[in-house]
Image: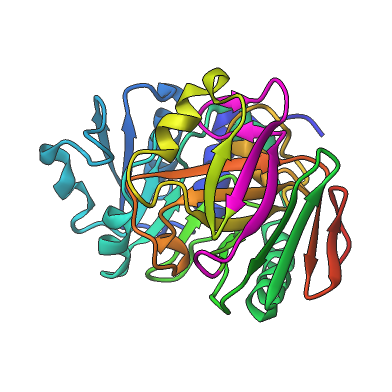
Amino acid sequence: MNLVTLTEAADILVKVCAKVSPNETVLIISDKAQDTQIIEALKQTVNGVGAKPKVVIYDSLEGGRLPPPYEAAFNNVDVVFACSTEPFYYDYFYDCTSKGARVLSMFRINTPTLLRTIQVDYEELAEELEDLGKRLQKAKIAEVKTLAGTNLVMELAGRKARLATGLAHKKGDLTFIPAGLVAVAPKEFTAKGRLFIDGTIIGAGRVQKPIMCMIQRGRLTDLADDQAYPLLRHKLSRDENANVLCELGVGTNPKAKIVGGAEDERVRGTISIGFGDNTLFGGKIRSQNHLDVTLLKGTLILDGELIVEAGQILV
């Protein structure tokens, strides 16, 4: 199937993913590094459905926070498209969703990723994500293995899984674009074993060769060849909780590809591991850091049942 155009992608985002209605106020917020064509396409489509676009573009973040003049942008809006190339604190989302706004987080998205991943069957995707989410919520023990050598075991805590369905239709909904990711916060400080990062360090790109890490009592304690990946070392040492294993995820988007970016977490059958803050997933870890890595051809076992085997979803 041919890639959609930006106009068609914006049409899907506004009409299918957010179901924007006439007279709604729609915040489109981004940094200046984002492709302006994405912003313009969203604005034109919002106008086209009779809603009111509110476009806010800022220079850069200040330690994860928006510059003070822009913090009020989330007031009195019905829908938010957050298109920044670097993520800001989710507290802004929590505040406006608590007041009924619908939020679509599109952090780190670029034009090729948007055009490649946007055209999926969202209802079918949501159904599969909900099934995987229930399995993660019910399980007590998760095992993650890869051909590269990863062998991790962690306890799960019965927490509600976060689903990137791409759909934000009800008041207070928070979803993610690209769609196609289910993630959960494991029980803190229970993960142990070896982790070989052989896919992507989100925000830094593809790894040149697998990076071996040791996980003990839920923390990344040893990182081989860290001099080759200074960003990884920097982020994992930002504060005392930055190196805590905080997230386990599975990608389900059939259109996503391994490209060295945020899209990689959505690749069907890819397993992702996060470190740092897990409050987005109902966890207890607060950190300035949230760093995700992807594992290729991974196997996920929940309470002894094969869920993903060598990158293939079995359930």
- How is the structure coloured here? rainbow
Q: Mark yes or no: residue 83 visible.
A: no
Q: Is residue 305 left or right of residue 259?
A: right
Height in image: 93 above or below 194? below
Instruction: Give the residue at x 37% y 21%.
Output: 33
Instruction: Give the residue at x 51% y 34%.
Output: 109
Q: Nearer the viewer, residue 16 or 127?
A: 127
Instruction: Give the residue at x 53% y 26%.
Output: 204
- Indicate the position of residue 42 as horizontal and vertical percent values: 43, 37
Q: Nearer the viewer, residue 275 or 182?
A: 275
- Indicate the position of residue 170 as horizontal and vertical percent values: 45, 71
Q: Is residue 149 magenta?
A: no
- Indicate the position of residue 110 as horizontal and vertical percent values: 53, 28
Of the 4 image quadrants, the one containing the C terminus is: bottom right
Height in image: 154 above or below 26? below
Of the 4 image quadrants, the one containing the N terminus is: top right
Height in image: 36 above or below 185? above
Q: Is residue 215 left or right of residue 144?
A: left
Q: Nearer the viewer, residue 177 or 149?
A: 149
Residue range in magenta is: 187-215
Q: Is residue 168 left or right of residue 56?
A: right
- Indicate the position of residue 90 as horizontal and vertical percent values: 34, 53
Q: Is residue 201 magenta?
A: yes
Instruction: Give the residue at x 57% y 69%.
Output: 161
Disc tally is 0
Q: Mark yes or no: residue 12 visible.
A: yes
